[in-house]
Image: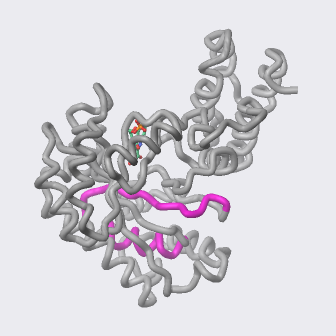
């Protein structure tokens, strides 16, 4: 999730919730290929976060091809293409969920990613990508050298998947899913809303179930998504709608335990919130233009269901460091 699932967030989620699969924030291939070096922050991860999928979005097939070479070189376990984002700045450019209305372009983009992966497997490097700046290519090469040897090797399989919605302004499962299946992708993650719905109303798991019928006789997995609030909810929906897996988004904000079958004997939500804040500082504090601000919303989510939540939240929203967060948590007896 953009602005949410950065390196520190994913690290905490993996440590305390153990989700089986995790995705980066979506990252613009146009941005990467126009030299926006800062976007490489989205691709930071460590070995504890595997299996980890890099998610990209955009509209220019050749930029997808080049960015795929970068993602392979960075050691990602898979590449996911966003065809589901409803945000105006994305959808108005023809990217994200608008691709549902242009299936031929969507297929070209998928083919470009598949080509990029094959080229990397055959020896292509970041410096071979014409639109990738030498600074970005060097940064990626440096990170590549630090990967475990198994991830430096070119022989591994790198699946391509799509994240999408059930339609643009109305559901079009019957037309859209077969177009995706023609490309031989490994998985489709389907959010049960149209673009027009954004996040309003309820996700339609009936439509997700219909899509699962369409993928059932193929080698493509169908992962359902939308409004899942607990492990038990996910298991029930997988059973009821015959999907191969379930993705949880918003319910994980401030609550990595959502992925667990049982809550830990002694939940330590505030200890881990503090750990999150410390990791946020460690990860980004030495970068130019560093700000603690993006961390504050996470702190608000961690305290959302405790007594005096709004009073504590106001104080947390004024913090600028993990030390200040600790002082507030201590004042309210939330950590020792
Ligand atoms: C703040 C925010 C950012 C999001 N960013 C992304 C993104 O970068 N890529 C993506 O595939 N979906 C993104 N989504 C959509 C979620 O992945 C998910 O499809 C949606 O929230 C429905 O699932 P949920 O009810 O479990 O949250 C985002 C959602 C939110 C609320």
Q: Which residue is drawn at 55% across and 72% down?
A: 75
The answer to whether residue 278 is above or below residue 150 is above
Q: Which of 183 and 122 is in front in this view?
A: 183
Magenta stretch holds residue 59:
yes
User: In the picture shown, does residue 256 fall above or below 67?
Assistant: above
The location of residue 269, given as percent across then percent down, is: 71, 32
Residue drawn at x 39%, y 47% is 239
Number of marks present in the image shown: 0
Quadrant location, ligand no. 1: top left
Residue at the right extreme? 336
User: Which quarter of the rendering shows the C terminus?
Assistant: top right
Q: In this view, does 200 lie above or below 195?
A: above
Residue 224 point in image, percent of width and height: 35, 47
Tell me, yes or no, if residue 205 can be seen here.
Answer: yes
Query: In this image, 206 relative to 4: left or right?
Result: left
Colour basis: one colour
Do we see residue 62 in this rendering? no
Q: In this view, does 37 lie to the left or right of 301?
A: left
Q: Measured along the vertical axis of the image, is residue 222 above or below residue 272?
A: below
Work out which residue is located at the far bottom of the displayed protein and give it. 122
In the drawing, does residue 241 fall left or right of residue 334?
left
> What span is in magenta?
48-74
Q: Residue at x 22, y 38 (%)?
A: 194
Residue 126 in the image: x percent, y percent?
47, 77
Q: Residue at x 55, y 63 (%)?
A: 51
Q: Is residue 308 left or right of residue 213?
A: right
**Image coords of residue 37 (percent x, y):** 50, 59
Residue 45 colored magenta?
no
Foreground residue, 193 or 107?
193
């Amino acid at each position: 999730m953009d602005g949410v699932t950065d390196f520190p967030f994913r690290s905490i989620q993996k440590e305390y919730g153990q989700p089986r699969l995790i995705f980066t924030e979506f990252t613009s291939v146009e941005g990467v290929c126009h030299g926006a070096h800062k976007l490489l922050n989205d691709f930071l991860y460590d070995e504890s976060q595997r299996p980890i999928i890099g998610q990209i979005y955009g509209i220019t097939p050749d930029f997808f091809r080049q960015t795929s070479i970068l993602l392979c070189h960075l050691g990602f376990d898979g590449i996911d293409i966003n065809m589901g984002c409803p945000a105006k700045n994305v959808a108005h450019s023809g990217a994200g969920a608008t691709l549902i209305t242009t299936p031929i372009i969507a297929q070209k983009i998928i083919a470009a990613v598949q080509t990029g992966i094959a080229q990397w497997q055959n020896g292509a490097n970041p410096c071979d990508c014409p639109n990738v700046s030498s600074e970005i290519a060097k940064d990626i090469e440096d990170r590549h050298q630090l990967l475990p040897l198994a991830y430096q090797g070119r022989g591994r399989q790198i699946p391509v998947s799509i994240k999408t919605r059930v339609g643009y302004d109305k559901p079009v499962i019957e037309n859209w899913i077969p177009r995706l299946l023609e490309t031989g992708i490994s998985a489709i993650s389907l959010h049960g809303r149209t673009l027009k719905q954004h996040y309003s109303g309820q996700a339609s798991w009936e439509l997700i179930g219909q899509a699962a019928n369409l993928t059932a006789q193929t080698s493509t997995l169908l992962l359902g998504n939308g409004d899942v609030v607990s492990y038990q909810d996910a298991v029930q929906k997988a059973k009821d709608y015959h999907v191969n897996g379930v993705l949880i988004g918003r319910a994980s904000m401030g609550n990595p335990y959502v992925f667990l079958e049982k809550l830990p004997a002694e939940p330590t939500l505030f200890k881990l919130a503090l750990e999150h804040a410390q990791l946020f500082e460690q990860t980004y504090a030495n970068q130019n233009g560093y700000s603690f601000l993006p961390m504050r919303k996470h702190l608000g989510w961690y305290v959302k269901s405790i007594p005096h939540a709004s009073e504590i939240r106001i104080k947390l929203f004024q913090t600028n460091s993990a030390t200040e967060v600790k002082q507030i948590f201590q004042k309210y007896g939330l950590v020792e």
